[in-house]
Amino acid sequence: MALLSIRVTPRAAKPGIGDWKTDPAGRPFLEMRVAAAPADGAANDEVVRLLAKALGVAKGSVRIASGQTARLKRLEVKLDEAEIRARLSR
């Protein structure tokens, strides 16, 4: 199981998963764009759905561990980090 840091851009014209970036402290995070607005959990639901589909796992295998109301989130994924990177680089 891995903790994945992501930065979400809601209300994006082209939803999808972007590139791996590094924050000023040197920590990696994944950029994600979702079409949903950040209201009533719609953007969070889309983040989970989009990431699960990209990784080829069930939605229940992806959970928001922290940052439910923030753009920066930590997701718990039932894969190891190397497998996540490999599946997202295809």
Image (tube, rainbow, N blue to C red):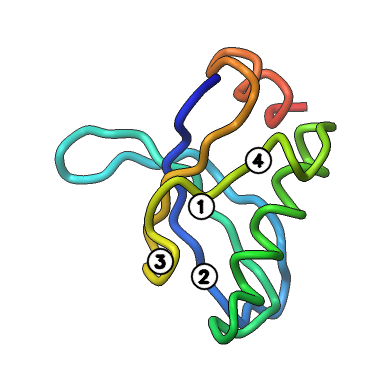
The vertical placement of 37 against 52, above or below, is below
| Number of the front mark, 4 or 1 | 4
Q: Element type at marker 4?
A: strand
| Number of the front mark, 4 or 2 | 4
Name the kind of residue labelled 1 in the image.
Glu
What residue appears at the point 45 percent right and 45 percent down from the top-left corner?
Answer: 65
> Spatial distance from mark 4 to mark 2, Cα to Cα?
18 Å
Name the kind of residue labelled 2 in the image.
Thr
> Disc 1 designates what residue?
31
Q: Say whether disc 4 or disc 2 marks the residue closer to the N-terminus.
A: 2
As rendered, which of 20 and 45 lies closer to the eye? 45
Q: Say whether disc 2 or disc 3 marks the residue closer to the N-terminus.
A: 2
Quadrant (top left, top right, bottom left, bottom right) of the C terminus: top right
Q: Which mark is residue 9?
A: 2
Name the kind of residue labelled 3 in the image.
Arg
As rendered, which of 88 and 74 lies closer to the eye? 74
The reply to whether dot 2 and dot 3 touch (C-beta < 8 Å) is yes
> Spatial distance from mark 2 to mark 1, Cα to Cα?
8 Å
> Disc 4 designates what residue?
62
Q: Say whether disc 3 or disc 4 marks the residue closer to the N-terminus.
A: 4
Question: x and y percent of residue 38 in the render?
Answer: 54, 81
Q: Which mark is residue 22?
A: none
| Number of the front mark, 3 or 1 | 3
What residue appears at the point 78 percent right and 40 percent down from the top-left corner?
Answer: 54
Quadrant (top left, top right, bottom left, bottom right) of the N terminus: top right
Q: Is residue 16 left or right of residue 85?
A: right
What residue appears at the point 51 percent right and 70 percent down from the top-left corner?
Answer: 9
Quarter-of-image position of residue 87: top right
The reply to whether dot 4 and dot 2 touch (C-beta < 8 Å) is no
